[in-house]
Image (spheres, rainbow, N blue to C red):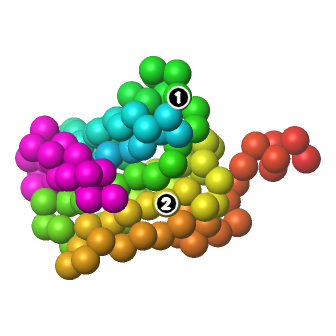
Amino acid sequence: MEDLLDAARDAIDEAYAPYSEYTVGAALETSDGSVYTGCNIENANYSNSLHAEEVAIGAAVSDGHRSFERVAVTSGKRDGVTPCGMCRQTFSEFCDESFEIITDGDEPTVYELGELLPTTITSDHLDK
């Protein structure tokens, strides 16, 4: 867990957050043990900004990964930030409800995706 948190903390160094000054880093572990990192990338209009978790999962999926074990998320403030609803929904596309989300506050906290995003929208809803 600590190695994954360290990778997320290192990713913060690449964050581009000139408007909010709120830097975020994420480290996503695939089922084969590969780790992909991401940082937030802001845009002046905010709606085009990218979240650290999106950047990490985008890189992993672009490399052919579709199965993930856990993600660590941290901010420059180390305030225990969790992925936003949009990022949680993105994780639910690839991960089941037991997917681990590690946050970095006073102490690391581990959540399960199903705990943070109950009754999520899945592809099953499209088939009905």
Query: Circles 2 and 1: CB distance less than 8 Å?
Result: no
| The one of 73 and 49 positioned closer to us in this rendering | 73
| Disc 1: which residue | 65
Which mark is drawn over residue 98? none
Name the residue rendered at 55%, 57% in the picture: 99
Task: Kindly report the distance in space between the C-alpha atoms of the residues bearing marks 2 and 1.
Answer: 17 Å
Name the residue rendered at 43%, 30% in the picture: 60
Residue 1 percent location from the top left of the image: 33, 59
Name the residue rendered at 26%, 67% in the picture: 104
Task: Give amino acid for label 1.
Answer: His
Going by the image, does 110 lie left or right of 38?
right
Q: Give the extent of the magenta segment.
A: 1-23
| Disc 2: which residue | 100
Residue 6 percent location from the top left of the image: 20, 52
Going by the image, does 120 lie left or right of 42?
right
Residue 44 covered by magenta stretch: no
Residue 27 percent location from the top left of the image: 32, 46
Going by the image, does 92 lie left or right of 110?
right
For label 1, the SS is loop
| The one of 31 and 61 positioned closer to us in this rendering | 31
Name the residue rendered at 51%, 48% in the picture: 69
| Among the 4 quarters of the image, the one containing residue 123 | top right
